[in-house]
Amino acid sequence: MKALFPIVAVGMALLTIAPRAQAQSADARVESLVRSGTVRVAVFPPQYKKDPASHAIQGWPVDLAAALAARLNVKAAMVEYPGPREAMEGLRKQNCDVAFLPIEPSWRADVDFSAPLMQIDFTVMVGPRSSARTVADLDRVPASLS
């Protein structure tokens, strides 16, 4: 069975509306990032990996953050979280500025989602005697997905 989870970027609209440092922006959120000199990007596994020797964070979110930072003429700083819920809490508490999150409808009250950035197909494998035929079959007591 497969479940499709579109991954979206909160604030990725900044890539398209963010001016170069020479131009003025009408968006106060962009101006705030430019004034701070840093865009703080939330990352969580499996979006990234750490180099075992240098401990540098690597992966597609780092590349996108670097592109956004270059466009804003600021530095990019990765802020690590254990998962998407914690990254969302980081956004709520203003401990980060941008996150690449799965679409969670309840979060729409707190953040603006861009159009989906990518789609990732996940497969759940169950044993041959399992009665589960859909992801919904697994997302109930006593079984649950997290």
Image (cartoon, rainbow, N blue to C red):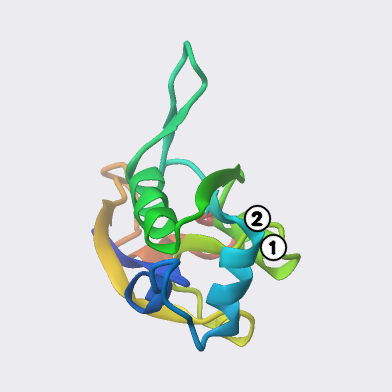
Tell me which residue sits at (38%, 79%) in the image.
17
Tell me which residue sits at (45%, 66%) in the image.
21
Can you identify the residue that label 2 sits on?
Answer: 86
- The front one of 78 and 87 is 78
The quadrant of the image that shows the C terminus is: bottom right
- The reply to whether residue 2 is visible in this rendering is no
The answer to whether residue 96 is above or below residue 113 is above
Query: CA separation, marks 1 and 2?
Result: 5 Å
Can you identify the residue that label 1 sits on?
Answer: 89
The answer to whether residue 55 is above or below residue 98 is above
- The front one of 102 and 54 is 54
Residue 66 lies, in percent from the top left, at 39, 49
Displayed quadrant of residue 114: bottom left
Q: Secondary structure at mark 2?
A: helix
Q: In this view, which residue lies farthest toward the top? A: 53
Q: Secondary structure at mark 1?
A: helix
**The disc labelled 2 sits on which kind of residue?**
Glu
The answer to whether residue 110 is above or below residue 145 is below
Tell me which residue sits at (53%, 54%) in the image.
41
Residue 8 is marked as none
The quadrant of the image that shows the N terminus is: bottom left
